[in-house]
Image (cartoon, rainbow, N blue to C red):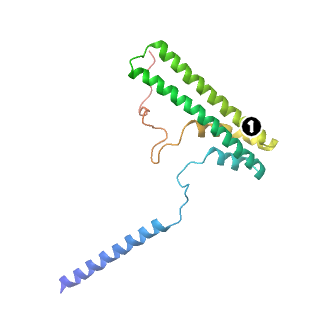
Amino acid sequence: MAYTIKSKWLVAGIIALLLANIISLAVFWLAPRSREAGRPETPAVFLTRELTLDAQQQAAYQQLIKEHRAQSEIIRDHINQARKELFMRMREGQADSASIGAASEKIASWTKKMDSTTFSHFLKVRQLCRPDQQRKFDAVIEEVMQMIARPAPPAGMDPNRGPHRPPPMDGPPPPDK
């Protein structure tokens, strides 16, 4: 008799656990989620919100973004091609300092062009703004530049410890020699 009572409680417990799991899964899978959950805010969304751009300004800003992306894509392609050529020199055994210097100068020239294009873009964005928005723009542009400067780390990765960063020091810095 004690055996049948224990087995009934065991079956009831298993059924209760199964129901709890099914309910948990249903809540997890059926709960409404934002498509943007976990993604960092884009500079465009950030600026639009912070500057409280009106509809006309937003339309002009979107056009500026479209133009800047087109220009940036071309420049990025040139930078990538120049880097590819640089590293092909290594594979082909042409890694002398003169050719490396020339290839590096080419990369630097395109990077300079990218920075100039980005500066010009944000200058045009600032010109879109009313005087009160320009003051706000001046206050938040550094934050926007930080958003642009480094891509967001993959989910779960510490942004201060990328794959190529050394581990933090656990003690005081070494003495100067």
> Measured from the top left, where is residue 102 in percent x and y?
52, 16
Quadrant assignment for the N terminus: bottom left
Q: Quadrant of the C terminus?
A: top left
Task: Identify the residue under disc 1.
Answer: 124
Q: Secondary structure at mark 1?
A: helix
Residue 89 in the image: state x and y as whole percent: 43, 20
Q: From this viewpoint, is residue 147 visible?
A: yes
**Is 125 left, or right, of 89 in this rendering?**
right
Q: Position of residue 40 (x, y in %)?
A: 56, 48
Identify which residue is drawn at 76% across, 47% down: 57
Q: Position of residue 127 (x, y in %)?
A: 78, 38
> Residue 135 sits in which quadrant?
top right
Tell me if residue 2 comes above or below residue 34 in the rendering: below
Instruction: Decide: is 158 above or below 168.
Output: below
The reply, left or right, for residue 140 in relation to residue 23 is right
Q: Nearer the viewer, residue 94 or 65?
A: 94
Q: Quadrant of residue 19?
A: bottom left
Along the horizontal axis of the image, is 76 left or right of 63?
Answer: left
Looking at the rendered structure, the number of numbered marks drawn on it comes to 1
The image shows residue 101, relative to residue 88, as above or below, that is above
Q: Residue at x 66, y 34 (%)?
A: 118
Crowd tier of the residue under label 1, counting other residues whose Cα lies within 10 Å: few below 14, some 14–19, many 20 or above: some
Q: Residue furthest right?
A: 131
Compare residues 110 and 50 and report the one nearer the observer. 110
Q: Is residue 12 left or right of residue 31?
A: left
Q: Amino acid at mark 1?
A: Lys
